[in-house]
Protein backbone atom coordinates (compact mmCIF):
# COMPACT_ATOMS: atom_id res chain seq x y z
CA UNK A 1 0.00 0.00 0.00
CA UNK A 2 1.62 3.29 -1.12
CA UNK A 3 0.91 6.10 1.34
CA UNK A 4 0.71 9.79 0.41
CA UNK A 5 -0.31 12.49 2.97
CA UNK A 6 -3.55 13.33 1.09
CA UNK A 7 -4.75 9.82 1.88
CA UNK A 8 -5.24 10.65 5.56
CA UNK A 9 -8.19 12.99 5.05
CA UNK A 10 -9.82 10.89 2.33
CA UNK A 11 -9.57 7.69 4.36
CA UNK A 12 -10.80 9.39 7.56
CA UNK A 13 -13.87 10.65 5.67
CA UNK A 14 -14.57 7.15 4.36
CA UNK A 15 -14.15 5.65 7.84
CA UNK A 16 -16.60 8.24 9.25
CA UNK A 17 -19.14 7.17 6.62
CA UNK A 18 -18.66 3.43 7.22
CA UNK A 19 -18.32 3.12 11.01
CA UNK A 20 -21.94 3.62 12.05
CA UNK A 21 -22.44 0.38 10.03
CA UNK A 22 -26.04 1.15 9.24
CA UNK A 23 -25.49 -0.81 6.03
CA UNK A 24 -22.87 -3.42 5.03
CA UNK A 25 -19.39 -1.83 4.92
CA UNK A 26 -18.75 -2.83 1.30
CA UNK A 27 -22.02 -1.18 0.18
CA UNK A 28 -21.18 2.07 2.01
CA UNK A 29 -17.70 2.06 0.54
CA UNK A 30 -19.03 1.50 -2.98
CA UNK A 31 -21.32 4.52 -2.48
CA UNK A 32 -18.39 6.56 -1.13
CA UNK A 33 -16.37 5.79 -4.28
CA UNK A 34 -19.34 6.67 -6.50
CA UNK A 35 -19.65 10.01 -4.72
CA UNK A 36 -15.90 10.67 -5.04
CA UNK A 37 -15.28 9.83 -8.71
CA UNK A 38 -11.96 11.72 -8.90
CA UNK A 39 -10.18 9.20 -6.65
CA UNK A 40 -7.57 7.21 -8.54
CA UNK A 41 -7.01 3.47 -8.21
CA UNK A 42 -4.17 3.90 -5.68
CA UNK A 43 -6.38 6.17 -3.53
CA UNK A 44 -9.23 3.68 -3.64
CA UNK A 45 -6.96 0.78 -2.76
CA UNK A 46 -5.60 2.75 0.22
CA UNK A 47 -9.08 3.72 1.45
CA UNK A 48 -10.51 0.20 1.07
CA UNK A 49 -7.54 -1.38 2.82
CA UNK A 50 -7.70 1.16 5.67
CA UNK A 51 -11.47 0.76 6.17
CA UNK A 52 -11.39 -3.04 6.19
CA UNK A 53 -8.14 -3.15 8.16
CA UNK A 54 -9.67 -0.97 10.87
CA UNK A 55 -12.79 -3.14 10.99
CA UNK A 56 -10.61 -6.26 11.30
CA UNK A 57 -8.64 -4.80 14.22
CA UNK A 58 -11.24 -2.46 15.65
CA UNK A 59 -11.45 -3.82 19.23
CA UNK A 60 -7.68 -3.55 19.69
CA UNK A 61 -7.46 -0.14 18.04
CA UNK A 62 -10.32 1.25 20.15
CA UNK A 63 -8.59 -0.08 23.24
CA UNK A 64 -5.28 1.68 22.54
CA UNK A 65 -6.44 5.09 21.30
CA UNK A 66 -7.59 7.61 23.93
CA UNK A 67 -10.56 8.78 21.94
CA UNK A 68 -11.79 6.66 19.04
CA UNK A 69 -12.24 9.06 16.12
CA UNK A 70 -11.90 8.09 12.45
CA UNK A 71 -8.55 9.89 12.35
CA UNK A 72 -7.12 8.39 15.57
CA UNK A 73 -8.18 4.88 14.52
CA UNK A 74 -6.60 5.40 11.10
CA UNK A 75 -3.31 6.70 12.49
CA UNK A 76 -3.11 3.88 15.03
CA UNK A 77 -3.92 1.33 12.30
CA UNK A 78 -1.18 2.67 10.01
CA UNK A 79 1.40 2.53 12.77
CA UNK A 80 0.42 -0.82 14.28
CA UNK A 81 -0.63 -2.85 11.25
CA UNK A 82 0.69 -1.20 8.09
CA UNK A 83 4.29 -0.79 9.18
CA UNK A 84 4.12 2.93 8.40
CA UNK A 85 6.87 4.80 10.14
CA UNK A 86 6.20 7.76 12.45
CA UNK A 87 8.70 9.74 10.36
CA UNK A 88 6.52 9.26 7.26
CA UNK A 89 3.60 10.80 9.12
CA UNK A 90 5.27 13.75 10.90
CA UNK A 91 4.52 16.22 8.09
CA UNK A 92 0.78 15.61 8.39
CA UNK A 93 0.17 15.05 12.12
CA UNK A 94 0.25 17.34 15.16
CA UNK A 95 2.84 17.18 17.97
CA UNK A 96 0.18 15.72 20.30
CA UNK A 97 -0.64 13.00 17.77
CA UNK A 98 3.03 12.28 17.32
CA UNK A 99 3.41 11.85 21.08
CA UNK A 100 0.52 9.41 21.58
CA UNK A 101 1.43 7.46 18.47
CA UNK A 102 4.92 6.97 19.91
CA UNK A 103 3.27 5.69 23.12
CA UNK A 104 0.92 3.22 21.46
CA UNK A 105 3.74 1.80 19.35
CA UNK A 106 4.90 0.04 22.49
CA UNK A 107 1.55 -1.58 23.34
CA UNK A 108 1.48 -5.25 22.37
CA UNK A 109 -1.52 -7.27 21.27
CA UNK A 110 -0.44 -10.07 23.62
CA UNK A 111 -1.01 -7.77 26.63
CA UNK A 112 -4.72 -7.61 25.80
CA UNK A 113 -7.66 -9.83 26.84
CA UNK A 114 -8.51 -12.95 24.80
CA UNK A 115 -11.58 -11.21 23.30
CA UNK A 116 -9.47 -8.30 22.04
CA UNK A 117 -6.69 -10.54 20.73
CA UNK A 118 -9.24 -12.66 18.88
CA UNK A 119 -11.21 -9.54 17.84
CA UNK A 120 -14.52 -11.04 18.90
CA UNK A 121 -17.36 -9.14 20.62
CA UNK A 122 -18.37 -10.32 24.11
CA UNK A 123 -21.61 -11.97 22.94
CA UNK A 124 -19.67 -14.09 20.46
CA UNK A 125 -16.97 -14.94 23.01
CA UNK A 126 -19.70 -16.21 25.30
CA UNK A 127 -20.98 -18.54 22.58
CA UNK A 128 -17.49 -19.73 21.55
CA UNK A 129 -16.28 -20.54 25.07
CA UNK A 130 -19.07 -23.13 25.32
CA UNK A 131 -17.47 -25.35 22.69
CA UNK A 132 -13.90 -24.14 22.01
CA UNK A 133 -10.77 -23.99 24.13
CA UNK A 134 -9.06 -20.58 24.36
CA UNK A 135 -6.22 -21.60 22.03
CA UNK A 136 -8.69 -22.50 19.27
CA UNK A 137 -10.61 -19.26 19.79
CA UNK A 138 -7.35 -17.37 19.38
CA UNK A 139 -6.35 -19.31 16.24
CA UNK A 140 -9.78 -18.74 14.74
CA UNK A 141 -9.72 -15.06 15.65
CA UNK A 142 -6.25 -14.56 14.16
CA UNK A 143 -7.14 -16.36 10.95
CA UNK A 144 -10.27 -14.22 10.53
CA UNK A 145 -8.20 -11.03 10.83
CA UNK A 146 -6.27 -11.89 7.65
CA UNK A 147 -7.63 -10.73 4.29
CA UNK A 148 -9.00 -13.68 2.28
CA UNK A 149 -7.05 -14.88 -0.78
CA UNK A 150 -8.62 -14.52 -4.21
CA UNK A 151 -9.91 -17.91 -5.34
CA UNK A 152 -11.12 -18.62 -8.84
CA UNK A 153 -13.14 -21.48 -10.27
CA UNK A 154 -12.34 -22.60 -13.76
CA UNK A 155 -15.34 -23.24 -15.99
CA UNK A 156 -14.23 -26.64 -17.28
CA UNK A 157 -16.93 -26.55 -19.94
CA UNK A 158 -14.92 -23.84 -21.69
CA UNK A 159 -11.30 -24.50 -20.75
CA UNK A 160 -8.92 -26.55 -18.60
CA UNK A 161 -7.48 -25.55 -15.24
CA UNK A 162 -3.89 -25.99 -16.49
CA UNK A 163 -4.51 -23.68 -19.43
CA UNK A 164 -5.84 -20.94 -17.16
CA UNK A 165 -2.94 -21.42 -14.77
CA UNK A 166 -0.45 -21.15 -17.62
CA UNK A 167 -2.11 -18.04 -19.05
CA UNK A 168 -2.15 -16.28 -15.68
CA UNK A 169 1.44 -17.22 -14.89
CA UNK A 170 2.60 -15.95 -18.28
CA UNK A 171 1.06 -12.58 -17.46
CA UNK A 172 3.04 -12.43 -14.22
CA UNK A 173 0.02 -13.19 -12.00
CA UNK A 174 1.11 -15.52 -9.21
CA UNK A 175 -1.34 -18.39 -9.18
CA UNK A 176 -1.49 -21.98 -7.98
CA UNK A 177 -4.03 -24.79 -7.97
CA UNK A 178 -6.18 -24.99 -4.84
CA UNK A 179 -5.36 -27.91 -2.53
CA UNK A 180 -8.83 -29.49 -2.56
CA UNK A 181 -11.17 -28.21 -5.26
CA UNK A 182 -10.44 -29.86 -8.64
CA UNK A 183 -11.44 -26.67 -10.48
CA UNK A 184 -9.95 -24.05 -8.16
CA UNK A 185 -7.05 -21.62 -8.59
CA UNK A 186 -5.68 -19.40 -5.83
CA UNK A 187 -4.20 -16.02 -6.77
CA UNK A 188 -1.59 -14.11 -4.83
CA UNK A 189 -2.43 -10.40 -4.66
CA UNK A 190 -5.50 -8.63 -5.98
CA UNK A 191 -5.34 -8.21 -9.77
CA UNK A 192 -8.49 -6.64 -11.29
CA UNK A 193 -9.74 -10.06 -12.33
CA UNK A 194 -13.22 -8.92 -13.42
CA UNK A 195 -11.65 -6.97 -16.29
CA UNK A 196 -9.61 -9.99 -17.39
CA UNK A 197 -10.55 -11.62 -20.73
CA UNK A 198 -10.70 -15.05 -19.06
CA UNK A 199 -13.33 -13.68 -16.70
CA UNK A 200 -15.24 -11.79 -19.33
CA UNK A 201 -15.39 -14.87 -21.56
CA UNK A 202 -16.83 -16.99 -18.73
CA UNK A 203 -13.75 -19.22 -18.39
CA UNK A 204 -13.22 -18.24 -14.77
CA UNK A 205 -15.46 -17.12 -11.91
CA UNK A 206 -14.49 -15.73 -8.51
CA UNK A 207 -15.42 -18.33 -5.87
CA UNK A 208 -13.91 -19.26 -2.53
CA UNK A 209 -12.53 -22.81 -2.53
CA UNK A 210 -14.79 -23.73 0.40
CA UNK A 211 -17.82 -22.69 -1.59
CA UNK A 212 -16.61 -24.84 -4.50
CA UNK A 213 -16.34 -27.89 -2.26
CA UNK A 214 -20.06 -27.71 -1.45
CA UNK A 215 -20.82 -28.34 -5.13
CA UNK A 216 -18.57 -31.42 -5.14
CA UNK A 217 -20.34 -32.64 -2.00
CA UNK A 218 -23.69 -32.47 -3.74
CA UNK A 219 -22.05 -34.06 -6.82
CA UNK A 220 -24.95 -33.70 -9.26
CA UNK A 221 -24.82 -35.92 -12.34
CA UNK A 222 -25.61 -35.16 -15.98
CA UNK A 223 -29.32 -35.18 -16.72
CA UNK A 224 -30.45 -34.95 -13.10
CA UNK A 225 -33.05 -32.60 -11.58
CA UNK A 226 -31.31 -30.37 -9.07
CA UNK A 227 -32.37 -27.47 -6.84
CA UNK A 228 -30.11 -24.81 -5.40
CA UNK A 229 -32.63 -23.58 -2.83
CA UNK A 230 -30.84 -20.39 -1.74
CA UNK A 231 -29.00 -19.60 -4.94
CA UNK A 232 -28.34 -15.89 -4.37
CA UNK A 233 -26.31 -14.57 -7.27
CA UNK A 234 -25.50 -18.12 -8.26
CA UNK A 235 -21.93 -18.85 -7.10
CA UNK A 236 -22.78 -22.47 -6.34
CA UNK A 237 -25.59 -22.92 -8.88
CA UNK A 238 -23.15 -22.14 -11.71
CA UNK A 239 -20.77 -24.80 -10.42
CA UNK A 240 -23.63 -27.34 -10.18
CA UNK A 241 -24.62 -26.61 -13.77
CA UNK A 242 -21.00 -27.10 -14.85
CA UNK A 243 -20.65 -30.41 -12.95
CA UNK A 244 -23.72 -31.61 -14.86
CA UNK A 245 -22.03 -30.67 -18.13
CA UNK A 246 -24.95 -28.36 -18.84
CA UNK A 247 -27.30 -31.41 -19.05
CA UNK A 248 -30.45 -31.83 -16.94
CA UNK A 249 -31.90 -28.97 -14.92
CA UNK A 250 -30.77 -26.79 -12.03
CA UNK A 251 -33.50 -24.65 -10.47
CA UNK A 252 -31.88 -21.65 -8.79
CA UNK A 253 -34.39 -20.44 -6.18
CA UNK A 254 -34.06 -17.31 -4.11
CA UNK A 255 -36.34 -14.77 -2.44
CA UNK A 256 -34.09 -11.88 -3.48
CA UNK A 257 -34.86 -10.43 -6.89
CA UNK A 258 -31.68 -8.35 -6.77
CA UNK A 259 -29.43 -11.35 -6.17
CA UNK A 260 -31.09 -13.40 -8.91
CA UNK A 261 -30.70 -10.40 -11.19
CA UNK A 262 -26.95 -10.42 -10.46
CA UNK A 263 -26.87 -14.07 -11.53
CA UNK A 264 -27.95 -13.17 -15.08
CA UNK A 265 -24.65 -11.79 -16.47
CA UNK A 266 -22.73 -14.61 -14.79
CA UNK A 267 -25.06 -17.17 -16.35
CA UNK A 268 -24.64 -15.58 -19.76
CA UNK A 269 -20.84 -15.65 -19.50
CA UNK A 270 -20.85 -19.27 -18.31
CA UNK A 271 -22.68 -20.47 -21.49
CA UNK A 272 -24.67 -22.92 -19.34
CA UNK A 273 -28.09 -23.81 -20.69
CA UNK A 274 -29.36 -25.96 -17.81
CA UNK A 275 -29.72 -23.26 -15.12
CA UNK A 276 -33.18 -21.83 -14.39
CA UNK A 277 -33.38 -18.92 -11.93
CA UNK A 278 -36.74 -18.77 -10.12
CA UNK A 279 -37.81 -16.00 -7.80
CA UNK A 280 -39.85 -17.42 -4.91
CA UNK A 281 -41.70 -15.44 -2.27
CA UNK A 282 -40.87 -17.84 0.58
CA UNK A 283 -39.75 -21.43 1.11
CA UNK A 284 -43.29 -22.81 0.73
CA UNK A 285 -44.01 -20.96 -2.52
CA UNK A 286 -46.14 -22.90 -5.00
CA UNK A 287 -43.14 -22.93 -7.41
CA UNK A 288 -41.31 -24.97 -4.78
CA UNK A 289 -44.23 -27.20 -3.81
CA UNK A 290 -44.97 -28.35 -7.33
CA UNK A 291 -41.53 -29.98 -7.46
CA UNK A 292 -42.17 -32.09 -4.33
CA UNK A 293 -40.73 -35.59 -4.67
CA UNK A 294 -39.25 -34.89 -8.13
CA UNK A 295 -35.71 -33.75 -7.38
CA UNK A 296 -32.49 -35.80 -7.31
CA UNK A 297 -30.26 -33.39 -5.36
CA UNK A 298 -30.93 -30.29 -3.32
CA UNK A 299 -28.41 -27.80 -1.99
CA UNK A 300 -29.47 -25.54 0.87
CA UNK A 301 -26.82 -22.84 1.20
CA UNK A 302 -28.83 -21.37 4.03
CA UNK A 303 -29.04 -17.74 5.10
CA UNK A 304 -26.77 -17.62 8.16
CA UNK A 305 -24.84 -15.32 10.48
CA UNK A 306 -21.98 -15.34 7.95
CA UNK A 307 -19.43 -15.40 10.77
CA UNK A 308 -17.25 -17.79 8.75
CA UNK A 309 -16.71 -14.95 6.25
CA UNK A 310 -15.37 -12.40 8.73
CA UNK A 311 -12.16 -12.12 6.66
CA UNK A 312 -14.26 -10.55 3.91
CA UNK A 313 -17.07 -9.06 5.99
CA UNK A 314 -15.55 -8.02 9.35
CA UNK A 315 -18.52 -5.70 9.95
CA UNK A 316 -20.78 -8.71 10.58
CA UNK A 317 -19.49 -8.74 14.18
CA UNK A 318 -21.51 -5.57 14.76
CA UNK A 319 -24.38 -6.34 12.43
CA UNK A 320 -25.20 -9.74 13.96
CA UNK A 321 -26.35 -10.35 17.52
CA UNK A 322 -27.71 -13.22 19.63
CA UNK A 323 -31.20 -12.00 18.69
CA UNK A 324 -30.55 -11.95 14.93
CA UNK A 325 -29.05 -15.44 15.16
CA UNK A 326 -32.20 -16.75 16.90
CA UNK A 327 -34.26 -15.42 13.95
CA UNK A 328 -31.87 -16.94 11.41
CA UNK A 329 -32.08 -20.37 13.09
CA UNK A 330 -35.87 -20.46 12.67
CA UNK A 331 -35.46 -19.60 8.98
CA UNK A 332 -32.78 -22.27 8.50
CA UNK A 333 -35.04 -24.97 9.95
CA UNK A 334 -38.02 -23.87 7.85
CA UNK A 335 -35.97 -23.79 4.63
CA UNK A 336 -34.37 -27.17 5.32
CA UNK A 337 -37.79 -28.76 5.91
CA UNK A 338 -39.19 -27.30 2.66
CA UNK A 339 -36.07 -28.36 0.74
CA UNK A 340 -36.18 -31.93 2.10
CA UNK A 341 -39.70 -32.27 0.76
CA UNK A 342 -38.44 -31.93 -2.81
CA UNK A 343 -36.36 -35.09 -2.89
CA UNK A 344 -37.04 -38.36 -4.66
CA UNK A 345 -36.26 -41.51 -2.65
CA UNK A 346 -32.47 -42.01 -2.81
CA UNK A 347 -31.95 -38.30 -3.39
CA UNK A 348 -29.23 -36.23 -1.70
CA UNK A 349 -29.69 -33.14 0.46
CA UNK A 350 -26.75 -30.92 1.41
CA UNK A 351 -27.26 -28.30 4.10
CA UNK A 352 -24.51 -25.67 4.35
CA UNK A 353 -23.74 -22.41 6.12
CA UNK A 354 -20.73 -20.13 6.32
CA UNK A 355 -20.84 -20.13 10.11
CA UNK A 356 -18.84 -21.92 12.79
CA UNK A 357 -21.63 -21.82 15.40
CA UNK A 358 -23.02 -25.29 16.24
CA UNK A 359 -26.47 -23.76 16.79
CA UNK A 360 -26.65 -22.92 13.04
CA UNK A 361 -25.00 -26.18 12.02
CA UNK A 362 -24.92 -29.46 13.97
CA UNK A 363 -27.93 -28.48 16.10
CA UNK A 364 -30.07 -27.71 13.04
CA UNK A 365 -29.12 -31.08 11.51
CA UNK A 366 -29.79 -32.96 14.76
CA UNK A 367 -33.30 -31.52 15.07
CA UNK A 368 -33.98 -32.10 11.37
CA UNK A 369 -32.97 -35.77 11.59
CA UNK A 370 -35.19 -36.27 14.64
CA UNK A 371 -38.15 -34.57 12.98
CA UNK A 372 -37.64 -36.28 9.59
CA UNK A 373 -36.45 -39.84 10.30
CA UNK A 374 -36.51 -40.81 6.61
CA UNK A 375 -33.29 -38.83 6.19
CA UNK A 376 -29.95 -40.35 7.15
CA UNK A 377 -26.59 -38.68 7.42
CA UNK A 378 -23.93 -39.43 4.80
CA UNK A 379 -20.22 -39.18 5.52
CA UNK A 380 -18.77 -36.01 3.94
CA UNK A 381 -15.22 -37.37 3.94
CA UNK A 382 -16.37 -40.41 1.91
CA UNK A 383 -18.42 -38.29 -0.50
CA UNK A 384 -15.47 -35.99 -1.16
CA UNK A 385 -13.12 -38.91 -1.56
CA UNK A 386 -15.48 -40.32 -4.24
CA UNK A 387 -14.78 -37.04 -6.08
CA UNK A 388 -11.01 -37.59 -5.57
CA UNK A 389 -10.88 -34.83 -2.97
CA UNK A 390 -8.68 -35.84 -0.06
CA UNK A 391 -10.19 -33.85 2.79
CA UNK A 392 -11.11 -35.44 6.09
CA UNK A 393 -13.02 -33.29 8.54
CA UNK A 394 -15.15 -36.24 9.72
CA UNK A 395 -18.78 -37.04 9.02
CA UNK A 396 -19.64 -33.36 8.76
CA UNK A 397 -17.67 -30.88 6.70
CA UNK A 398 -16.24 -28.04 8.77
CA UNK A 399 -13.80 -25.80 6.94
CA UNK A 400 -11.69 -23.33 8.83
CA UNK A 401 -9.77 -20.31 7.55
CA UNK A 402 -6.98 -21.25 9.99
CA UNK A 403 -6.57 -24.82 8.67
CA UNK A 404 -7.91 -24.83 5.13
CA UNK A 405 -7.50 -21.17 4.12
CA UNK A 406 -11.11 -21.11 2.97
CA UNK A 407 -14.10 -19.32 4.45
CA UNK A 408 -15.53 -21.10 7.50
CA UNK A 409 -18.09 -23.30 5.75
CA UNK A 410 -20.07 -26.06 7.42
CA UNK A 411 -21.95 -28.77 5.53
CA UNK A 412 -23.91 -31.93 6.23
CA UNK A 413 -25.03 -34.35 3.53
CA UNK A 414 -28.10 -36.54 3.91
CA UNK A 415 -29.98 -39.06 1.86
CA UNK A 416 -33.73 -39.63 1.73
CA UNK A 417 -35.15 -43.14 1.78
C1 LIG B 1 -25.73 -17.75 1.93
S1 LIG B 1 -26.69 -16.91 0.79
C2 LIG B 1 -26.56 -17.86 -0.67
C3 LIG B 1 -25.33 -17.63 -1.49
C4 LIG B 1 -25.33 -18.36 -2.82
N1 LIG B 1 -25.68 -19.76 -2.68
C5 LIG B 1 -23.98 -18.28 -3.51
O1 LIG B 1 -23.27 -19.28 -3.62
O2 LIG B 1 -23.65 -17.18 -3.95
C6 LIG B 1 -28.31 -17.26 1.33
C7 LIG B 1 -29.41 -16.87 0.37
O3 LIG B 1 -30.65 -17.33 0.90
C8 LIG B 1 -31.64 -16.48 0.40
N2 LIG B 1 -32.87 -16.74 1.16
C9 LIG B 1 -33.28 -16.19 2.32
N3 LIG B 1 -34.48 -16.71 2.69
C10 LIG B 1 -34.82 -17.61 1.74
C11 LIG B 1 -35.95 -18.47 1.56
N4 LIG B 1 -36.93 -18.50 2.43
N5 LIG B 1 -35.95 -19.26 0.49
C12 LIG B 1 -34.94 -19.24 -0.43
N6 LIG B 1 -33.86 -18.44 -0.31
C13 LIG B 1 -33.80 -17.64 0.77
C14 LIG B 1 -31.03 -15.11 0.54
O4 LIG B 1 -31.66 -14.16 -0.30
C15 LIG B 1 -29.58 -15.38 0.14
O5 LIG B 1 -29.38 -15.11 -1.23
Image: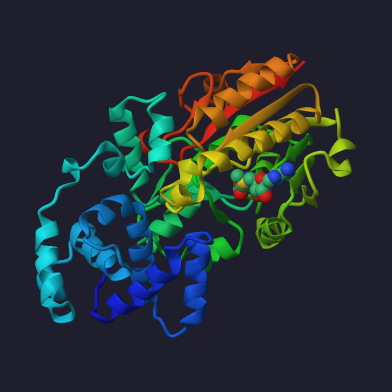
User: Colour mode?
Assistant: rainbow
Counting from the top left corner in percent of width and height, residue 324 is at 57, 43
Left or right of 405 on screen, residue 139 = left
Which quarter of the image is occupied by the C terminus?
top right
Counting from the top left corner in percent of width and height, residue 92 is at 18, 80
* Snapshot quadrant of residue 124: top left
Residue 214 visible? The answer is yes
Which quarter of the image is occupied by the N terminus?
bottom left
Residue nearest the observer in this picture, 406 or 138: 138
Counting from the top left corner in percent of width and height, residue 391 is at 46, 27
Left or right of 339 on screen, residue 315 = left
**Placement of 155 over or under 323, stated as above or below:** below
Residue nearest the observer in this picture, 164 or 17: 17
Counting from the top left corner in percent of width and height, residue 415 is at 70, 20
Residue 238 visible? The answer is no
The residue shown at (44%, 52%) is: 312
Name of the residue lying farthest toward the front: 67
Residue nearest the observer in this picture, 390 or 171: 390
Residue nearest the observer in this picture, 397 or 110: 110
Count of all numbered marks drawn on residues in the image: 0
Left or right of 7 on screen, residue 329 = right
The residue shown at (80%, 28%) is: 341
Amino acid sequence: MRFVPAHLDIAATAIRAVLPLEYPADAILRRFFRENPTLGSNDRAFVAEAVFGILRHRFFLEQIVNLATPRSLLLAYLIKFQGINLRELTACISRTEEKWLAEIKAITLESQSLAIQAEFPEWLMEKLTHFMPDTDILDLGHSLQQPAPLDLRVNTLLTKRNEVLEALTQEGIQAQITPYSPSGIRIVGRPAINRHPLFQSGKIEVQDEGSQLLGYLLAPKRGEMVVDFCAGSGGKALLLGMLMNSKGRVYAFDVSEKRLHNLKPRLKRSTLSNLHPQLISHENDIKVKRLAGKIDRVLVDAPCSGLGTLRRNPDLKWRQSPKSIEEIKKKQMAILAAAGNLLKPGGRLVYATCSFLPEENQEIIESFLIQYPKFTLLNCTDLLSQQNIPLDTGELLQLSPALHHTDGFFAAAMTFT
